[in-house]
Image (spheres, helix red, strand yellow):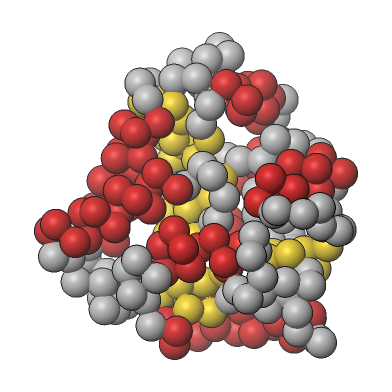
Amino acid sequence: MKIEVSESYQLMSEKCVSDFLEFIKPLKNPLICTASGDTPKGMYKELIKQVEEKKIDISGWHFISLDEWVGMNGDDEGSCRYHLNNDLFHPLNIAEDKIIFFDGRAGDLQRQCDKVDSYINKMGSIDVAIVGLGMNGHVGMNEPGTPAALHSHISAIDAMTQQVGQKYFKTEQQLTKGLTLGLASLQETSFLMLLANGNRKSAIVREIFENGNSPELPATSLLSHRNICVYLDKEAASLITRNTNE
């Protein structure tokens, strides 16, 4: 495990893009898992800038969904797909056939999970997963108590996540269930990027490093990943007592 601490959120975002592009450069048709939310927005903004300025060929890039609220899809303002469309897919002009995403409005939710898992298997594996750290230690919609052996599944959303998730919507929503890649799905990726920024994340960052592997802190199960890098800004890392240069 590597831990990268940057002086600011902007520098953290730039470091994320630098490492991402370095890893993905030799790959012909990479499969990329992208999280929505506030934390990776800076990375996506910097990535779009570098793709445009350096004329990086992204025609072979493929994208896989990390998660989506049950009852929503890209047509719903505030959904995970809605935000990724605005923050990444549309600015990069990603073709629809290069994106496989959970549809939370589908009648058969288990079939959505099977579709995503089948696509990953077809592509071989997820090459890079960009994920954020939730306030309760969740990753994707793998909430506290989620078994580490699960692949794509229907999740019950923790009360804290339901509350925090309201910030993405103009009116209050019922956010009781989600569709998500499982912890096993993320453990099987070739390169896992775990991002957290800001003072509000400092306490949970400290917990995941100090409490050991715990089902109540889903992110802890990923720290043993063979190729994981945790990206933090100075604020998020402010309560860590371990050596971040190891």
Give the residue drawn at x 76%, y 84%: 106
Give the residue drawn at x 26%, y 78%: 59
- Left or right of 209: which side holds 92? left
Q: Count the marks: how many? A: 0
Query: From this viewpoint, which residue is outermost toward the left?
Result: 54
Q: In which quarter of the image is residue 60?
A: bottom left
User: In the rendered view, would you say 38 is above or below 234?
Assistant: below
Query: From this viewpoint, which residue is outermost toward the front?
Result: 170
Residue 45 point in image, percent of width and height: 34, 51
Which quadrant would the C terminus be assigned to in this image? Answer: top left
Q: Residue 35 versus residue 77: which sits nearer the camera?
A: 77
Residue 195 is at least partly visible in this image: yes
Give the residue drawn at x 50%, y 85%: 122
Q: Residue 157 versus residue 76: which sits nearer the camera?
A: 76
Q: In which quarter of the image is residue 5?
A: top left
User: In the rendered view, would you say 235 is above or below 89?
Assistant: above
Q: In which quarter of the image is residue 191?
A: bottom left
Give the residue drawn at x 57%, y 50%: 37
Q: Residue 20 versus residue 94: which sits nearer the camera?
A: 94
User: In the rendered view, would you say 205 is above or below 155?
Assistant: above
Residue 226 is at least partly visible in this image: no
Residue 62 point in image, percent of width and height: 40, 76
Residue 125 point in image, percent of width and height: 48, 72
- Left or right of 169: which side holds 93? left
Residue 95 point in image, percent of width and height: 38, 83
